[in-house]
Image: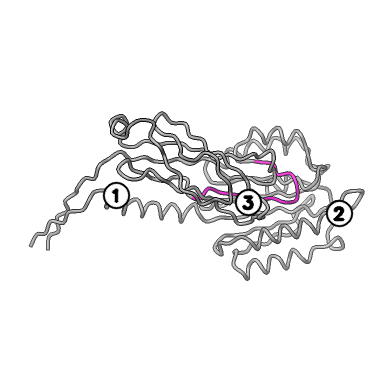
Amino acid sequence: MQKIIKYPIWFLLIILSAKNIFAQQQRVDEKKYIFLLDITKSMFGCCGSPDIFEKVRTHLINAIENISDPNAEIVLSTYQQKIIDTWKVKASAEGKRNLINNLKKISNKNVPGQETNILGAWNEATSHLDNKKINIVFILTDGEHNDPNVPIQKFYDEIPRWKNVSSYQQAYMFIVELTDLAIDNKVREIVAKTKDVQIINGIEFFILEIKEQSPILNTEDDLVFTFGLKKDNWNPKFNDLPFLLDIKSDYFELDKKEIRFSELPLKIRLVPKKPLNKLKEELEPITYVNVEANYPSEKFPQIKLLNNSISVQVNNRKEKVLKIEVIN
């Protein structure tokens, strides 16, 4: 007996796409947080430096506690001239509790008295990267690199090589200047030219990530996508953070361009610049529209957005029917 079952082709495409998307999400949505914490004596107020360790530890504990995905991985290494300790845990309640307990044991009395080797911290972070995960690295320091055995030029030379690392895996590096004594203008200059490396100035640091960076729309339906942000660590005092949405397209504009963090998630509509029937005649079967989300980063240096780009896929196809023959 032979049966002919008719399915809209978009239905089958959705099934196939969903399987592919799910597989991709399994690969790239899981996160690995890598923290490198400076525990040189200056962090505890030695030699005229401000005593900031307790504040830094408190904020770091808050950041760890607010990692919401229990499957995420956390690596925490403490360093001076050398790596002192390294702990690796899953972001489960037990894993985070064990990590925080180790953090709480650190004191001025039980740390060595070495110099600061930021290159060593950088290399340690790189050794923990996982190309199957989104890697988010924080190197926290209250001073400049000053290890007499490692010329600072080697650190300068290493920074631009990060673009080679991030070219084949998702990896974001943040150098956290905990005090103004950590500011190295040469480092800042190099970082400004290096993809996926950023500077955060101050003890607080917050990371945002766009939830859906590749929405798929169709000219036969509402041209609407949802703009939302993921946040594992956040302070409500920044809920009024403004965002400007920008689109560069000959075919569409946005119905909303200025929004606030507190409004998210928010539905954004692509508005055709010409009558829809004419637009359909001009569009290719698939068109990609780039939308960028920007905020005043100079006013909020403690907040970083991992990737500010949204690639909207606009399908310009009517429903087609595919016949599948089932033979019993």
Out of 160 and 104, give the one closest to the viewer.
104
**Location of mark 1 (residue):** 13
Crowding near the residue tagged with mark 2, few <14, some 14–19, many ≥20 C-alpha atoms within 10 Å:
some
Residue that extends furthest to the bottom in the rendered view of this protein: 94
Seen in the image, is 27 located left or right of residue 217? right
Answer with the quarter of the image where residue 307 lies. top right
Q: Mark 1 falls on what kind of element? A: helix
Q: Amino acid at mark 1?
A: Leu
Q: The magenta stretch spans which residues?
A: 198-211
Q: Amino acid at mark 3?
A: Asn
What residue lies at 47% left-to-right and 45% top-to-bottom? 213
Dot in front, 1 or 3: 3
- In this view, 6 is above or below 156: below
Dot in front, 3 or 2: 3
Residue contact between numbered discs 3 and 2, judged by CB atoms under 8 Å: no
> How far is disc 3 from disc 2 in space, using C-alphas?
30 Å
Q: Mark 3 falls on what kind of element? A: loop
Q: Is residue 236 visible?
A: yes
Q: Which scheme is used to colour this image of the protein?
A: one colour
- In this view, 304 is above or below 98: above
**Location of mark 2 (residue):** 51
Q: Quadrant of the C terminus?
A: bottom left
Out of 23 and 286, give the one closest to the viewer.
286
> How far is disc 1 from disc 2 in space, using C-alphas?
59 Å
Instruction: Residue 239: give its label.
Output: 3
Crowding near the residue tagged with mark 1, few <14, some 14–19, many ≥20 C-alpha atoms within 10 Å:
few
Q: Could you tell which of marks 1 and 2 lies nearer the N-terminus?
A: 1
Seen in the image, is 64 located left or right of residue 278? right
Residue contact between numbered discs 1 and 2, judged by CB atoms under 8 Å: no
